[in-house]
Amino acid sequence: MYFRIGHGYRAGLSGVFFILVLFACVVLHELGHALMAKRFKVMTRDITLYPIGGIASLESMPTKPAQELQVTLAGPAVNVAIGVLIWIFLIITHQMPDLETISTGNLVNLPFAFNIMYANFILAVFNLIPAFPMDGGRVLRSLLAMKMDQTKATNIAAKIGQFLAIVFVFFGFFYDFWLVFIGMFLFLGAGAESKAGELKYALEGIRVKDVLMTKYSVLNTENTLQEASRHLIDTNEKSFLIMKNDNVEGILNYKDIIEGLHKGNANEKTETFMQKDFVWLNPEDLLTDKLPVIGQGKQSLFPVKSDDKLIGVLNTENIDKWILAKHNLLIHEK
């Protein structure tokens, strides 16, 4: 951008370096969440960076509102700390620009460190917008959950977030169209969080054994993709356990079968296309504890074992059917 508007290669390289440093600050923000979560024995699966920020994927959120509040605030706190340290550095080294220079809004004329400081303060403020999936939405939910049950707190926080999203979209049409995209992002995020909260409430206290499927198709490593496709047609199942000598060797899903057939591999063995790295579930596992793993979408079918013996399988479709059956039963009882 700097190069295109006539500031030259040096300014352009400075702009690139600024973006890289800013993304490093985003990583530190997410590490703040991860380290605070680890304090409450919640591990982080991974940290993913996007053009608009980053997400630390935690295995779960602490159940206590006060703990969730600390985990959530840890991210913005890192940005504030970075900003304060840079501010102290600018003061000590006499590099802090005067108000007149700052008011021009010309980033090229401002010290590089000042721009990083300013960006970190903006990151902290932006993340504290009280709307999901921003940190502020979780802060609001945590504060509300201290006075009411978490499901109700999530719904209220989601509705507030969606209202703010609509406000962003409205003003975006008149002032800055980027606000429209931010508003849409917040609206969708609030809706997703509300649904996740309802799902968690519906499955509260339910264990894997309660929704376990005991009737399912099994393929072996010698079966071909053509034979697997026949099972897709003959059954309602979309994923299959691949076994060898009574041992589960992998998971073969619908996408793998279709993709293999499309590439002309109908006579290839299933073991070539199966997912070999998969997660087992225990029948006593609480579904609410396993939702983050199940909801990842990396695995379509979960084998369940007890005393090292396969006793059934579980997938998201079966969970949805169980919730629907429970909902209809409650309506019938009323």
Image (spheres, helix red, strand yellow):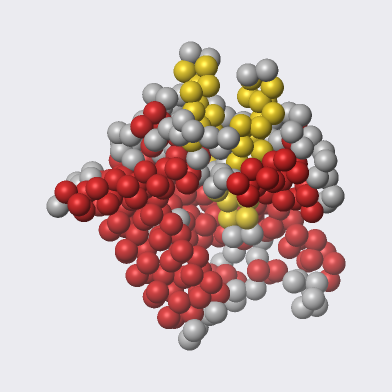
Indicate the position of residue 203 as horizontal and vertical percent values: 33, 40
The N terminus, quarter of image: bottom right
Indicate the position of residue 111 as horizontal and vertical percent values: 66, 61
Q: Could you say which quadrant of the image residue 207 lies in?
A: top left
Q: Residue furthest front?
A: 234
Residue beneath the point at 38% across and 54% down: 195
The answer to whether residue 33 is visible is no
Exactly how many numbered labels are in the figure?
A: 0
**Observer-nearest residue: 132 or 243?**
243
**Observer-nearest residue: 201 or 118?**
201
> Please, is residue 51 above or below residue 43 in the view?
below
Left or right position of 244 against 55: right
Residue beneath the point at 40% across and 60% down: 190
Residue beneath the point at 46% across and 64% down: 188
Residue beneath the point at 14% across and 52% down: 334
Q: Could you say which quadrant of the image residue 206 lies in?
A: top left
Left or right position of 245 against 132: right
Q: Residue furthest left?
A: 334
> Please, is residue 181 above or below residue 112 in the view?
below
**Observer-nearest residue: 264 or 308?**
264
The answer to whether residue 202 is visible is yes
Q: Could you say which quadrant of the image residue 224 lies in?
A: top right
Indicate the position of residue 67 as horizontal and vertical percent values: 35, 36
Indicate the position of residue 49 as horizontal and vertical percent values: 63, 50
Left or right position of 330 against 233: left
Q: Residue furthest top?
A: 307
Left or right position of 260 against 167: right
